[in-house]
């Protein structure tokens, strides 16, 4: 039986692989049971659900699809690189990378960097739009994580708070 939708087939396959990997990886923790859940229970269940969802999408791809088989288009390299780069920059700036000599810049600077780098994934992005979004996201993140949840991580650059 040949696939009628390449997009659905490869999406379903990706879901099955990632879900299975999470379910198998969570077995390193105590899983427990529904009444007494261990730390591995939730990731195991999510992995299994993701794999089952992927299996459903994969099976559907063999039955339903467009007239030309819904071929996969070219990889959008620009958005892929900027979105991954934005997440890497966020992580590196949030707590720093001592091995590379990068100090911790904290939550606020990291969010601004994340938004501005990710906005470059869209060719017609506006700096004003990014500034407004970054400011709103920084304020809401500060309020939610620092004030409401009392999480302990750097908010401002390390060299300003010493």
Image (cartoon, grey):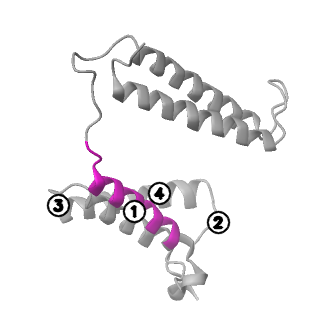
For marks 4 and 1, give the CA distance.
17 Å
Q: Where, quadrant-wise, is the N terminus in this rendering? A: top left
**Residue at 52% over, 88% down:** 159
Q: Nearer the viewer, residue 154 or 100?
A: 100
Residue at disc 3, secondary structure = loop
Q: Nearer the viewer, residue 98 or 36?
A: 98
Residue at disc 2, secondary structure = loop
Looking at the image, can residue 155 be seen? no
Dot 3 crowding, Cα within 10 Å, few <14, some 14–19, many 20+ = few
User: Residue tagged by mark 2?
Assistant: 152
Residue 33 screen position, x and y as percent: 83, 26
Dot 1 crowding, Cα within 10 Å, few <14, some 14–19, many 20+ = many
For marks 1 and 2, give the CA distance.
23 Å
Check if mark 4's residue and mark 1's residue have beta carbons within 8 Å: no
Residue 26 screen position, x and y as percent: 73, 40
Q: Nearer the viewer, mark 3 or mark 1?
A: 1
User: Residue tagged by mark 1?
Assistant: 86
Earlier in the chain: of badge 4 and badge 3, it is 3
Q: Nearer the viewer, residue 108 or 27?
A: 27
The picture quadrant where one finds residue 72 is: top left
């Amino acid at each position: 039986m040949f696939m009628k939708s390449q997009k659905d087939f490869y999406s379903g396959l990706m879901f099955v692989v990632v879900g299975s990997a999470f379910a198998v990886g969570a077995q390193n923790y105590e899983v427990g049971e529904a009444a007494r859940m261990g730390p591995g229970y939730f990731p195991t269940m999510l992995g299994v659900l993701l794999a089952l969802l992927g299996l459903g999408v994969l099976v559907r791809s063999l039955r339903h699809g467009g007239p030309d088989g819904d071929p996969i288009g070219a990889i959008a390299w620009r958005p892929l690189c900027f979105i991954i780069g934005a997440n890497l920059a966020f992580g590196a700036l949030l707590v720093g990378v001592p091995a590379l000599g990068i100090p911790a810049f904290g939550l606020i600077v990291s969010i601004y960097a994340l938004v501005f780098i990710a906005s470059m994934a869209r060719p017609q992005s506006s700096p004003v739009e990014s500034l407004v979004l970054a400011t709103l996201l920084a304020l809401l993140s500060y309020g939610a994580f620092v004030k409401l949840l009392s999480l302990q991580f750097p908010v401002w650059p390390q060299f300003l708070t010493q």
